[in-house]
Image: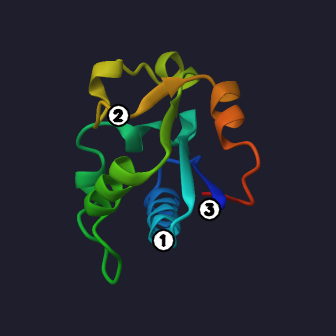
Amino acid sequence: MSEKMVVVCNGDEAKNIMPALIFASSGLALDYEVYFFFCPAGAKWALKGELEKLGTPKGLPNPIELFDTIIGLANKVTFCELGLENKGIDPKDMRDERIVIEKLPPFLMDAEGATMTFTF
């Protein structure tokens, strides 16, 4: 059984999402069970068109390719339900239908036993 890894995006700047995407995709490359969580503060990164605004930052991987890898291989990508009302977000604006919208407790139960947690 592989190790569990939690990555949390808790900010709306490139300095929050890029390391979160890089850490999560690197964890997947090492065969970790990755659980990714968008807090309300990082909510915009789960929306259509937002990663595209970053382009490909100099010397860094393409954020869209990283996200696509994560959404396809992670154990769970979660958007905090509190972000819907807090940020005025409609669920249909999520960049991918595989993003799970739920409160924090179910996410924490799934990620229980994680040996690594990274928050950006």
- Horizontal side of residue 7 vs 69, given as left or right: right
**Position of residue 66 measured from the top left corner of the image (x, y, whole percent):** 34, 62
Q: Which amino acid does label 1 sit on?
A: Ser
- The crowding category of the residue bearing disc 1, from other C-alpha atoms within 10 Å (few below 14, some 14 to 19, many at least 20), is some
**Position of residue 61 measured from the top left corner of the image (x, y, whole percent):** 32, 74
Badge number at residue 63: none
Residue 5 or residue 15, whichever sits in front: 5
| Mark 2, residue position | 98
What's the CA distance linking mark 3 and mark 1?
14 Å
* Pair 3/1: label in front: 3
Q: How many marks?
A: 3
Mark 1 vs 2, N-terminal side:
1
| Mark 1, residue position | 26
Residue at 33% x, 50% y is: 72
Q: What residue type is labelled 2?
A: Arg
What's the CA distance linking mark 2 and mark 3?
22 Å
**Position of residue 103 measured from the top left corner of the image (x, y, whole percent):** 61, 23
